[in-house]
Amino acid sequence: MPREIQTQVLPEIAAHEVLLQNHVAKMLSVSENDIKKVEVLKRSIDARQKVIKINIKAIVYFTHESYSPKTVYLPHYEDVSKKQEVIVVGAGPAGLFAALQLIELGLKPIVLERGKDVRGRRRDLKAINRDGIVHEDSNYCFGEGGAGTYSDGKLYTRSKKRGDVDRILNLLVAFGASPEILVEAHPHIGTNKLPQIIQDVREKIRECGGLVLFETKVVDFVIKNDEMQGVVLQNGDVIHANKLILATGHSARDIFELLDRKKIAIEAKPFALGVRAEHAQELIDKIQYSCDYRGSFLPPAPYSIVKQVQGRGMYSFCMCPGGVIAPCATSPGEVVTNGWSPSKRDQSTANSGIVVELKLEDFAPFQKFGALAGMEFQKAIEQKAWHLAGETQKVPAQRMVDFSNKKQSTTISKTSYVPGTKSVELGNVFPDFITKIMRQGFQDFGKSMKGYFTNEAILHAPESRTSSPVRIPRDSQSLEHIQIKGLYPCGEGAGYAGGIISAAIDGEKCALKIAESIRNKSN
């Protein structure tokens, strides 16, 4: 019968099927001709030693055994055009995967997205990059596919529920993603490939009788006796349904304000905030792979680093090898950074958010805003950065060593951030406690990653949208809001996810709970 193996090989062997098959034959003391197929299940890089190896988990099929490539299929989706309707607010991964799950369960999703479809967003992304014009409902955060679509498409998650993770990955493959995402330890689709996948998801929802409406902004909820009845749109129209999945993302400040204004329970949530650091990818490769040239068989090196500095966690976030830094403001009068990589990760620079964990007590100066205190803290830093950089989409920037030495940089080399940079002493952007931690933290990073602490690295401020500053509380069993029946807070914006995969999983969980609630009520 087929045999499962684990082995370590050189990168060039892992990259070639025949060489890998020859290696496995020697490992098992059989002839190369005795092996029909080595099917790789999981692949990861081990760069802990001077000679870099690739960890391989695989199944070996021998010549007398049958083998057929695994084909990934979509689930059966029936026509739900006449079925009970469920409103889904937001067409990010939480909303889209909730909609697919609803269809699978025989319910009709009505997906309401404030932004444009995935192709239509491109003109507005060009406007913010080239002209500094921020379209509040169509940008890197808002629009079909959500924030992940044009900010990297990373699929790594810390979720321990492997079955749920594999289900989402298989669905993505069935919609056109490379099967390699099922194998790689840190899978990644890339911003150049995600749009077509998302478009195909949308068309499947419509094909099955669901609705997906763009440039359709929810401005109010219809609630009676603490039960959801529907939503009011910006144009005055009302859509009625007594089940609503709220999947609006971590930057939908107007939704947080609406909930607060209507006295619907929300709470401030800690998040992390800092800068986005850019190095030459060649330097990161040298540090991580301990070599002058990584060769053609290793991908651009990522890094992940965590330090305790003055009692706070300071860590890398959303690291983008071979990527660029993007402007992610969602309103005029603010600047926000994020990073992304194309599928080949072939840009000459590497960037990562480097952020400091915040605590609820840090928001004390904004306590008059109640549950929105963290959001107002976040806004204040983004607005200050906008002002200091010249009130455009340029960002405040500083060389890394200069920042740690409290010295404004005399020059800022050109970076991947298209709108441009302005030399600013970044201590003027952040509260003192964040500045002090980062000044020391970068030096500490340099002790662990020799060469990382360099004045060739440029810091861009701020990296402020790491997660939602608000949590929308829900019952741990039913996933309904603790106060409003029929309201299902979902995904990153509600405080229950942190990335594409975990958001998609949470969307599916909410859909399953809605179906369960409807079944129980009808029995």
Image: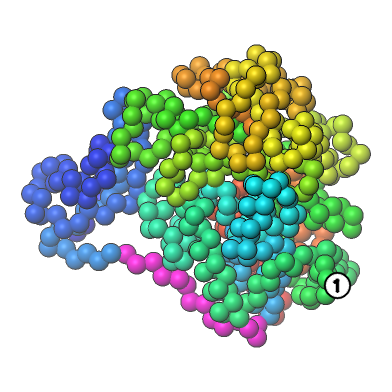
| Nearer to us in this view, 400 or 226 | 400
Identify whether 202 is placed above or below 49.
below
Q: Residue at x 59, y 77 (%)?
A: 206
Looking at the rendering, the stretch of residues picked out in magenta corresponds to: 70-83
The quadrant of the image that shows the C terminus is bottom right
Q: Is residue 51 left or right of residue 309?
A: left
Where residue 220 appears, as percent x and y from the top left, is 84, 64
Where residue 201 appears, as percent x and y from the top left, is 54, 68
The quadrant of the image that shows the N terminus is bottom left
Q: Which residue is mark 1?
A: 236
Specify how the rendered protein is coloured.
rainbow
Residue 66 quadrant: bottom left
Q: Main secondary structure of the magenta part?
A: loop
Farthest residue in the right direction?
Answer: 368
| Nearer to us in this view, 148 or 266 | 148
Q: Is residue 519 magenta?
A: no
Identify whether 308 is placed above or below 76.
above
Q: Residue at x 77, y 65 (%)?
A: 217
Farthest residue in the top direction?
Answer: 405
Q: Is residue 77 magenta?
A: yes
Identify whether 236 is placed above or below 459.
below
Residue 198 quadrant: bottom right
SS for dot 1: loop
Q: Amino acid at mark 1?
A: Gly
Where residue 102 appears, as percent x and y from the top left, is 61, 72
Q: Is residue 29 left or right of residue 251?
A: left
Q: Residue at x 47, y 53 (%)?
A: 189
Whether residue 292 is visible, yes or no, is: yes
Q: Residue at x 10, y 44 (%)?
A: 29
